[in-house]
Amino acid sequence: MATGRTHRPATRSRGIPEATVARLPLYLRALTALSERSVPTVSSEELAAAAGVNSAKLRKDFSYLGSYGTRGVGYDVEYLVYQISRELGLTQDWPVVIVGIGNLGAALANYGGFASRGFRVAALIDADPAMAGKPVAGIPVQHSDDLEKIIEDNGVSIGVIATPAGAAQPVCDRLVAAGVTSILNFAPTVLSVPDGVDVRKVDLSIELQILAFHEQRKAGEEAAAASDGAGPVVAGRSDSADKGPDGDVPAVMPA
């Protein structure tokens, strides 16, 4: 079976924009749902609505794949599932290690969607000696002292970091030195990596802060509309929404 160490996705060599790559999983999720319902074809409008994008953008994205659909018929669902899966590198086995088996790491280990999407949890790693040998999701946790050997033995090129912030960079450095070239970071910190290493960051607190900003803005708009009764309020212009407690724009990082 092929592993992530010897095969790489074809997206970069084919010149597919990063924005398009980021939308391909959305299309794949929508198409998989259609496939499970035995829907044979789908129009660009229907698929775009299911994926949450506009149809013109979808057709442009699919043109990079060489898929243009058939006028009056639409796109073949099964073929698009295969085409996008191949482009994302999901038609092969990608062994993954998860480092940091606390509450979040354990939840990730128990996620049942990895296998069906082309990923295999090859190892769970933690620095706590008391965790060594403890089964999580049916996989025994291994000590971080063996990280390099685990990566080499399993041909791992994708690592997931679910450690506390202070441990994330040292873990990242070890992963990279051992040959990992793609990292999914759940730790609340920014990682420094050399060229050629891809990092995707998932920060739930930042996402919640962004939602809080929008809730604050909506509340400000409603309060302004209720107080003056002078018609609709221009979105994003109420003082209570635009300013933080000290009169400045709230320190919310962009998505």
Image: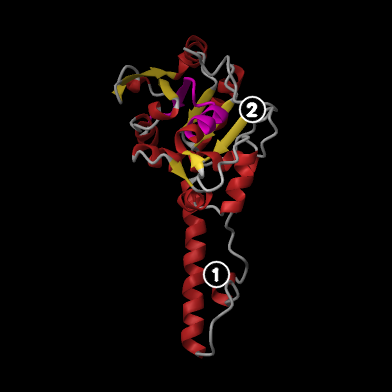
Give percent across and percent down for residue 26.
Answer: 49, 43
- Up the image or down, 241 lies above or below 34; here it is below
Amino acid bearing label 2: Val
In this rendered view, identify the residue nearer to me: 60 or 182.
60
Give percent across and percent down for residue 211.
Answer: 48, 59
Q: Which residue is mark 1?
A: 245
Q: Is residue 211 visible?
A: yes
Amino acid bearing label 1: Pro
Quarter of the view holding residue 129:
top left
Name the residue located 60 percent from the left edge and 75 percent from the top edge: 237
Point out the frontmost of discs 2 and 1: 2
Q: Secondary structure at mark 1?
A: loop
Tell which circle, 2 or 1, labels the residue nearer the N-terminal end.
2
Give percent across and percent down for residue 13.
Answer: 69, 27
Name the residue located 42 percent from the left edge and 22 percent from the top edge: 120
- Up the image or down, 250 lies above or below 255; here it is below
In this rendered view, identify the residue nearer to me: 74 or 175.
74
Which residues are the magenta region? 81-101
Q: Is residue 126 visible?
A: no
Q: Which residue is mark 2?
A: 197
Residue lying at the far front in this picture: please name it.
72
Give percent across and percent down for residue 175.
Answer: 56, 22
Q: Secondary structure at mark 2?
A: loop
